[in-house]
Image (tube, rainbow, N blue to C red):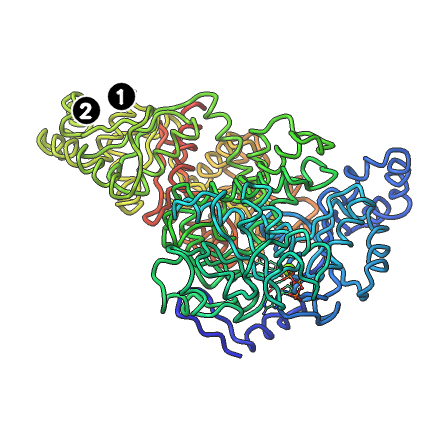
């Protein structure tokens, strides 16, 4: 069953899907220990006798389970497989791939630990009894793919029996996401909820929950017609009814989906593949809103709709079309927020808050790192972009925050969050380990804001970075460039520069122009530069102008690099700014990998340093590590460890270690050693004389090529996040980004420049 689509998104074949699930360890999940289990002592702590201590503590005070066990961050995804996606009742075992999938999405998107449980019964009471006793294991229960009407009874009963959130994702997750998409689609088509006519096809778990939420949000009950396999759910109908359908039965002459849809504004499809025909779409109102959400195949495809109407807003549940209205946008983040306040339940206020936050996100300008989630096609709020994609990195901060606040306001939070700013930062840190390292830097810069000059002010990503710098309250952003060009480029890119904290300076027209020229000439006159050469550099080269601004105190730091290669930009800057007295300029990169942070140097300046220079690099890097908040344990790396195997390259490193010995530096260091010895305590244990007290957190490379190659490989193959190279040792804060830097990279570098300006 090869799936072909006419869009740019991923399209997968059946074979690919099977191979994906079978490759390596079958399935999509494994359990990883969070504590070391290497020694006898570890065993004594983790298991008998040590484990008895938290047991007794929890027996005395059950809330301690959140401190000593996984409970507070653990959600069970539970199904009996009676409504697997839109595939029908295929049983508990067959539902396992979907449930494993939901569990990994919890982890990937919101750092919620999750496990799937497939319960092999269709009997509601048996199912309830199975789940109700699992409460102590979990912080929340996500029910999935259980068919209506049993799902309503099961969820209702479990909510009564359990004191943790029980949330049937197909009901409420779907309702929240469709509500968010619909809020925006109504806005774009100029409709009012109260008068919008909607037809919901599918009167099961998802359909019923969706229209309940829509009504709670302001849709008029008489304007919503519900349909199922028997047609319209009208007042007086007896066939195929249940109490949940009856609650939404309306007085209408319409009996079929086709009749109901005549003139309707909105179609919500939560039924089955192919349920909506071209003819029905034809009969809908102007600018119809069509959410064909059946999975994996929608009620009608976007291609089919496009053939007959060009005025429709079209969404499906799939990731390979625009406007994916799928509950994956909700459940990870909703549980994140609920867990973080130890909510007893997920109530309507929390659901509506999530829907509104999601809708709001789609209306905001999309920054560079978010554009990457959209394959670089920066979307603009409109018919093809009514809702963010699941990979949108803003979701992790926005949705849990809204949910947690709503939980606190509605009185269901057992552990209210007192510092919401800190919570926002913690949420961002969950998405990307870099965020927690940067958090401290951002915090301090906010307390001591700085004026940063963005030397390439005419570039779009630089303007975005400047706006973000100011919006994040980090200080003033100075954009260097021609005023008219900057304004035109900003207008074209939809960037609002007209705000306090953003200044534009045109080097040629600046009243400081002659002062800077004199300053540069003073420095360069004996290095082959005439006055007019300096004048030209100040007029035309923004790196020189920016460097003079900082050198003469008109700004606190510089960010540059998106239009020049690294070494050219550094040469420009070095004409104006020297090394700090007694220091050597180096490049240091911060590498975040598997929860560890290491600083690698020199990643930018010295090609093949001699022993003296390697020792200097080590000192600079150690100082940098301290300024970043790490107590340095520094490994002088080579291909050999303590003399084996011998080689000329290693001798230079050995010599550098001896130089550091003589200098009596005040940090831990040792070498020469191979990278595995430096980073792995077991490998390190083979050298009992080693002077490091633990695995190294600063790695000094023997040469530029090994530094550059290893950090780039870590980034590309190891999935590590690398910040840098950061310039260290200059007398003034300057950071040079890479040519392909995104706005978020530029803001980080600006923040680091501002941070070092205060150091
Ligand atoms: N995009 C998303 O995020 C989500 C999408 N869905 C999709 O919604 C669909 C329903 O799921 P769910 O509510 O959990 O399942 P349920 O089994 O609880 O309900 C299915 C409902 O669909 C109706 N139905 C089935 N086929 C048709 C048809 N051809 N025409 C009209 N109605 C039909 C059934 O009618 P009857 O009552 O007469 O049997 C029933 O009311 C699935 O395709 C699923 O993939 C679900 C959750 C999330
Ligand atoms: C997305 C989802 O949960 C479903 O289709 O059932
Ligand atoms: Mg589902």
Residue 678 shows in the view = no
User: Where, quadrant-wise, is the C terminus in this rendering?
Assistant: top left
Q: Which residue matches tag 1?
A: 552
The residue carrying mark 2 is 516
Tell whether 648 sits left or right of 245. Answer: left
Query: Viewed as shown, does residue 371 lie left or right of 442?
Result: left
Disc 2: CA contacts within 10 A as few (<14), some (14-19) or many (>=20) = many
Residue located at (59% from left, 29% from top): 420
Residue 70 appears left or right of 496: right
Question: Residue 192 at x, y = what percent?
Answer: 45, 43
Q: Is residue 17 above or below residue 579?
A: below
520 shown above or below 465: above
Query: Residue 589 or 152: which is nearer the viewer?
Result: 152
What is the x, y in percent for residue 208?
A: 64, 54
Q: Which mark is residue 27?
A: none
**In contact (CB < 8 Å): disc 2 and disc 1:** yes
Q: Secondary structure at mark 1?
A: loop
The answer to whether residue 324 of the structure is visible from this angle is yes
290 or 231, nearer to the observer: 231
Circle 1 packing at 10 Å, graded few (<14), some (14-19), many (20+), is few
Secondary structure category for the residue under label 2: helix
> Which comes before the other along the chain, label 2 or label 1?
2
**Residue located at (29% from left, 29% from top):** 498
Mark 2 vs mark 1, CA separation in Å: 8 Å
């Amino acid at each position: 069953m090869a799936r072909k689509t006419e869009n740019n998104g991923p399209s997968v074949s059946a074979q690919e899907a099977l191979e994906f699930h079978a490759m390596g360890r079958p399935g999509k999940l494994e359990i990883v220990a969070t504590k070391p289990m290497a020694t006898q002592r570890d065993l004594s702590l983790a298991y008998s006798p040590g484990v008895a201590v938290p047991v007794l503590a929890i027996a005395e005070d059950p809330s301690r389970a959140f401190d000593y066990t996984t409970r507070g961050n653990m959600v069970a995804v539970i199904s009996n497989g009676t409504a697997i996606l839109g595939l029908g009742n295929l049983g508990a075992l067959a539902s396992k791939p979907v449930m494993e999938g939901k569990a990994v999405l919890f982890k990937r998107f919101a750092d919620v630990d999750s496990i799937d449980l497939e319960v092999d019964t269709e009997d509601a009471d048996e199912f309830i009894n199975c789940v109700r006793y699992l409460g102590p294991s979990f912080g929340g229960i996500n029910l999935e793919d259980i068919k209506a009407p049993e799902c309503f009874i099961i969820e209702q009963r479990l909510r009564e029996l359990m004191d943790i959130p029980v949330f049937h994702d197909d009901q409420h997750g779907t309702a929240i996401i469709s509500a968010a998409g619909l809020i925006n689609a109504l806005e774009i088509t100029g409709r009012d909820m109260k008068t919008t006519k909607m037809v919901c096809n599918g009167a099961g778990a998802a359909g019923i929950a969706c229209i309940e939420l829509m009504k709670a949000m302001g849709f008029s009950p008489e304007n919503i017609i519900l349909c199922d396999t028997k047609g319209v759910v009208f007042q007086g109908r007896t066939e195929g009814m249940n109490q949940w359908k009856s609650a939404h039965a309306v007085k209408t002459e319409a009996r079929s989906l086709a009749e109901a849809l005549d003139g309707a504004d909105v179609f919500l499809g939560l039924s089955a593949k192919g349920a909506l025909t071209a003819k029905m779409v034809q009969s809908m109102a102007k600018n119809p809103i069509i959410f064909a959400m059946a999975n994996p195949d929608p009620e009608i495809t976007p291609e089919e709709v496009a053939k007959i109407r060009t005025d429709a807003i079209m969404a499906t549940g799939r990731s390979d079309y625009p406007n994916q209205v799928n509950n994956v946008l909700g459940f990870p983040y909703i549980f994140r927020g609920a867990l973080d306040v130890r909510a007893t339940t997920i109530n309507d206020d929390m659901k509506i808050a999530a829907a509104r936050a999601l809708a709001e996100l789609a209306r905001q300008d999309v920054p560079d790192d978010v554009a990457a989630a959209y394959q670089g096609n920066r979307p603009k709020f409109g018919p093809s972009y009514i809702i963010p994609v699941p990979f949108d990195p803003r979701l992790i901060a926005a949705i849990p925050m809204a949910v947690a606040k709503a939980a606190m306001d509605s009185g269901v939070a057992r552990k209210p969050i007192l510092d919401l700013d800190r919570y926002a930062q913690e949420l961002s840190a969950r998405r990307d380990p870099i965020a927690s390292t940067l958090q401290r830097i951002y915090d301090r810069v906010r307390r001591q804001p700085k004026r940063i000059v963005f030397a390439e002010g005419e570039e779009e990503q630089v303007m975005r970075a400047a706006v973000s710098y100011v919006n994040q309250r980090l200080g003033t952003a100075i954009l260097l460039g021609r005023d008219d060009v900057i304004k035109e480029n900003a207008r074209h890119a939809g960037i609002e520069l007209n705000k306090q904290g953003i200044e534009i300076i045109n080097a040629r027209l600046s009243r400081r122009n002659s002062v800077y020229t004199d300053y540069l000439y003073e420095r360069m006159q004996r290095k082959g530069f005439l006055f007019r050469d300096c004048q030209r550099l100040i007029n035309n080269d923004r790196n020189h102008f920016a460097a003079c601004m900082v050198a003469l105190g008109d700004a606190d730091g510089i960010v540059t690099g998106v239009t020049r290669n690294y070494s050219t930009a550094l040469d420009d800057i070095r004409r104006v700014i020297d090394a700090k007295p007694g220091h050597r300029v180096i490049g240091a990169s911060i590498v975040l990998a598997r929860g560890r942070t290491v600083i690698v140097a020199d990643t930018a300046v010295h090609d093949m340093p001699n022993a003296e220079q390697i020792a200097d690099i080590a000192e600079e890097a150690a100082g940098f590590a301290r300024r970043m908040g790490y107590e340095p344990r520094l490994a002088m790396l080579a291909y050999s460890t303590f003399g084996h195997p011998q080689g000329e390259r290693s001798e230079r490193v050995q010599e550098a270690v001896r130089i550091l010995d003589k200098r009596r530096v005040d940090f831990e260091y040792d070498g020469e050693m191979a990278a595995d010895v430096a980073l792995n305590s077991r490998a390190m244990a083979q050298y009992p004389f080693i002077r490091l007290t633990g695995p190294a957190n600063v790695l000094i490379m023997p040469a530029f090529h090994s530094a550059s190659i290893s950090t780039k490989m870590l980034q590309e193959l190891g999935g590590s996040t690398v910040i840098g190279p950061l310039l260290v040792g200059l007398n003034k804060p300057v950071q040079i980004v890479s040519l392909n830097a995104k706005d978020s990279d530029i803001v980080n570098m600006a923040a680091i420049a501002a941070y070092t300006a205060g150091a």
